[in-house]
Amino acid sequence: MRFIPSPQRHASRGRAPLVATMVAALLLAAVTLTPARVAAQPLLPATFLPISASVVRVEANRQQGGNSIGSGVVVAPSVVVTNCHVTRDATAIRISAAGQLFEATGQRADGAHDICFLHVPGWQGKVVKVADGSAPRVGDPVAAIGFTGGTGRSLHFGRVRALHVFEGARIVQSDAAFTSGASGGGLFDRDGQLVGLLTFRSRESASSFYALPVQWILDRLPVDDQWAEIHPLPDAAPFWQRDIVTQPYFMRAALLGAQQRWPELIELTAMWAKADPQDAEPFRVRGGALRALDLGESAVHAFNEALRLEPDNPLTWYGLALAYASIGETAASAQAEWVTVNLDGDLATPLHDEIATVHAAR
């Protein structure tokens, strides 16, 4: 385990102009994105009523007995996508829609990515609009639709809280809640486009819910000769259920952060950044860990590096505002706070309170 030495805490006369220059440059990069984010309006339930009919209940007869219940989304004519962890033990699969049951006659599975397609020729439900593969932005409003508890269809609103680069796309983390039975349901943007497949929740956080990227769905959408018979999938363990040392970096980082194992988290981010130097997230996570260790100046550097790669992430600006506050750079902190709030207004109150706490502790 490697610890990072503490920097000098006294102020430097030559540092203030440099701080102002860095913040000014980052402000220019982010400010052009601000108006669209501020103008976002709350989502309305009525918008998603027509879409909800394309989110169906999935019932799988398990090889070991009993049923597995989940959700699915109609992504092509007679094609439903769901999670493989819903259907991996199945000997037969049906969907429940429009008050009827329809038999799935074929499947195409990518167990490692937890994406399974079902061919349901008897079902002629409306196909959802799938986003073009580009992920939503952090702070964007989203709606989660699935069969909560496997019974009634539910609708929950929230916002995108993080995007995690993995396997050529971005896994969407939001606070739009869902529970067991909603796995395989849809995460939709304000225009009703599918932006993610509801898949798993965090045990470390009561407000962290993860959806698989639609790019994975688009890349794997089956053609007619790719359907296989319905059968159990013994090797369908998804990436998020693997042993912790083989899980994606963002999941390992979340666990270390929840356990406040800051030096180990810093070491992990070094490996993470080396593995994917164009990903801003390891630098943002590193900044948070450094700030937790009271290494404010090092944290500022890490957050600035994250913003160089991704200048419009409100979580990074949030961390930067706190890091500047921790080293007494009040003006720089206020500027970073302004950008944060303009990118995601929901962060205004918690950030203001945290900055006040930091100032009180100095």
Image (cartoon, rainbow, N blue to C red):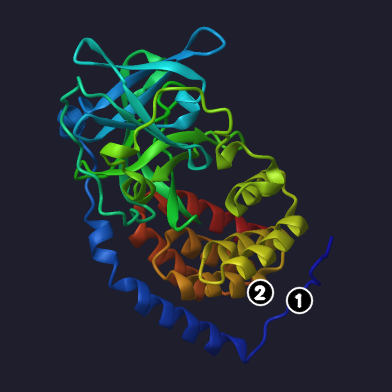
Q: Which residue ends up furthest to the top in the rendered image?
A: 66
Residue sitting at 49 percent across and 42 percent down? 113
Packing grade of label 1 (10 A; few <14, some 14-19, many >=20) is few
Residue that mark 1 sits on: 7
Residue sitting at 32 percent across and 19 percent down? 57
Query: SS of the residue at dot 2?
Result: helix
**139 in relation to 206, above or below:** below
- Closest to the observer: 355 or 211? 211
Label 1 and label 2: CA atoms lie apart by 7 Å
Side of 147 relative to 326 (left or right):
left
**113 in relation to 83, above or below:** below
Residue that mark 2 sits on: 297
Query: SS of the residue at dot 1?
Result: loop
Cβ atoms under marks 1 and 2 closer than 8 Å: yes
State the image coordinates of residue 247 (x, y, percent, origin top left).
63, 46
Residue sitting at 36 percent across and 72 percent down? 30
Q: Amino acid at mark 1?
A: Pro
Packing grade of label 2 (10 A; few <14, some 14-19, many >=20) is some
**130 in relation to 275, above or below:** above
Q: Which residue ends up furthest to the bottom in the rendered image?
A: 14
State the image coordinates of residue 213 (x, y, percent, origin top left).
39, 47
**138 in relation to 128, above or below:** below
Q: Amino acid at mark 2?
A: Glu
Lower sequence index among marks 1 and 2: 1
- Closest to the observer: 210 or 106? 106
Q: Which residue ends up furthest to the front in the rendered image?
A: 225
Q: Which quadrant holds residue 54? A: top left
State the image coordinates of residue 204 (x, y, percent, origin top left).
61, 37
Side of 148 relative to 123 (left or right):
right
